[in-house]
Image (spheres, helix red, strand yellow):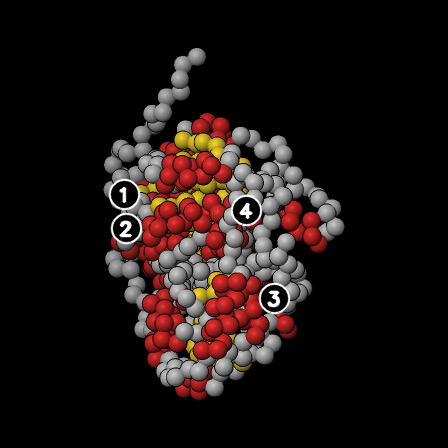
Amino acid sequence: MTAQSTAPIIADTAPAPRSINTGAHWVVRTLEQIGVTRIFGYPGGSIMPVYDALVGSRLQHILVRHEQAAAFAADAQARLTGTAGVCLATSGPGATNLLTGIANAYMDSVPMVILTGQVPTSVMGTDAFQEIDIFGMSLPVCKHSIIVRDPDRIPELIRQAFQIAETGRPGPVLVDLPKDILQAEAHPPISPSRPKPGPSRSISPRLDAATALLASSKRPVLYIGGGVALGGAVDALRDFMSRTGIPAVATLKGLGCSHPDAQNFMGMLGMHGSREANMAVQESDLLICCGARFDDRATGRPDGFAPSAKIIHMDADSAEIGKLRTVDIAVHGNLAAALYAFDTGYLDISDWRDICLQRKREHAFDYDAPGNGIFAPAMLRQLSEAAGDDFIATCDVGQHQMWVAQHCRFNTPEAHLTSAGLGAMGYGLPAGIGATLQCPNKKVVTITGDGSIMMNIQELATARRYNIPVRILLLDNSSLGLVRQWQEHFFEENYSEIDLYDNPDFADVARAFGVEAFTVHSRDQVPDAIERLLNATGPILAHVLINPRENVWPLVPPGKSNTEMMEN
């Protein structure tokens, strides 16, 4: 038996593209003119004309092994650049496989342009082979959806898709491309530039009232959400925190907006938030909500959330203000400008600040766990500290997601990429591929679990094909850990379908894909494992065995207020 060749059967380089003006060629030319350099996709019948036009183009196409991974990889690239990521797939199952990734981008306000093939217009509506109404299916999870019916309008509509995706509150835009439109002759007017965003919104006239409310406060708290990063207001927020010394908390998407070492940063709030963060919010008399949306995972029982606090809600999206909580002052507009213009004056909050800092010291996490087993929170802390300013985590969903949020250090919001609103398992590995391609000099680490990795494990082939040096830290507890934890505490230990005892040896699986891999069994192996992981020059997987009974603490039980935290 001979070794399998790693050489491609058919080269992807030659021949040069044919010099014709089809709709498909204008799709590719328009992407090039706009400045797109990389797209993620998977070919098929209806989108095949675009793949024909890709040959010889300046676009780097990354062939994923599942369309969902194309959307997740484009999502990660977009989060790092602030410009729309691009993915494409064929009609029918190719398009429907993108939907989870599209919904993920919509929930987390990520700019994305999705190109889908469609059956020819002559058979649309006839249940043709691989026909699906992706336009209709995408409407609830897109900012805008477009069906192209005139090949001459392809450049115009693609440029429009980018403009919609990237301006205002970012989000995904789908462009559905019937096959006959892609194959038709096209002679559109040329407009080579990417549309420029419009001017920033002005600051709300209520800022003076907000300043007066803050001046009368004795126990203010700054509540930071993902809108701070979306609005380019990170520097302004840090300046505001430094000027005021107001205790600050963050949502899952708000992590990294505050510097992790800021003295007045209390950490994440909510269901798995820190005690000092939740107690600060619950005892506050003024909550300055900046770019957050009062999500249920952050607030717990709504009527018990910050019950004595007046609310100043600052957001670029007016639809979020007052949606879930009645506010006293609305500050709608440019967040950075509003934060810089917030004239705080003298704040008499030294006693309140001392209380919060004392709690922060008292409830600091203890990483000295008993036994010789691997303590996941400690390993994650050590990993992020070892990677330093170059650390970027692309995190899956489950217990490890909460441990990452609690224990990793994020110097910028772009260092923490995770499926926050949708909570989609399988995000981590394709996101790691997209992030590593975009930031090859950073230490990108995909942090995943034995449940999540199986959702898109086929993307090990993508990492190996392009030798993408994504580092995978797989925490294996042989179970769906977060579901098991809930069944343990809220379903009387009636464990149902959470046992993953029959997991494969993930290191062997990775090696079968041609990816370097090793297994970590004990705590004394952790330092060398972190060093090996971070210094790898190609894709690598560390299979880390952890205690199946380990839980994430603290935990606010469902239906309870954030003061009612379980700690063990």
Residue that badge 2 annotates: 32
Question: In which quadrant of the rendered view does residue 11 lie?
Answer: top left
Residue at image coords 51%, 35%: 522
- The amino acid sitting under disc 1 is Ser
Horizontal placement of 484 versus 377: left or right?
right
Sequence-wise first label, 4 or 2: 2
Mark earlier in primary sequence (3, 4): 4
Between 1 and 135, the one lying in front of the other is 1
Q: Are marks 2 and 3 in contact (CB under 8 Å)?
A: no
Between marks 4 and 2, how big is the CA–CA gap?
53 Å
Q: Nearer the viewer, residue 240 or 247?
A: 247
N-term-proximal mark, 1 vs 2 = 2
Identify residue type, mark 4.
Ala
Within 10 Å of disc 1 (Cα), the crowding (few <14, some 14-19, many 20+) is some
Do the numbered discs 4 and 1 sit on residues whose CB atoms are within 8 Å? Answer: no
Q: For residue 369, which numbered disc appears in the image?
A: 4
- Camera-side residue of 62 and 254: 254
Give amino acid for label 2: Glu
Q: Residues within 10 Å of mark 3 (few under 14, many from 20)?
A: many
Residue ID for mark 1: 57
Verify CB contact (< 8 Å) between mark 1 and mark 2.
yes
Looking at the image, residue 375 lies above or below residue 562: above
What residue do we see at 39% from left, 65% from top? 262
Q: CA distance from mark 1 to mark 3?
A: 54 Å
- Which of labels 1 and 3 is toward the front? 3
| Residue hosting label 3 | 562
Helix, strand or loop at disc 1?
A: loop
Secondary structure category for the residue under label 3: loop
Give the residue drawn at x 61%, y 66%.
562
Q: Mark 3 belongs to which amino acid?
A: Asn
Say if 542 sits above or below 248 in the image: above
Q: Is residue 195 left or right of residue 104?
A: left
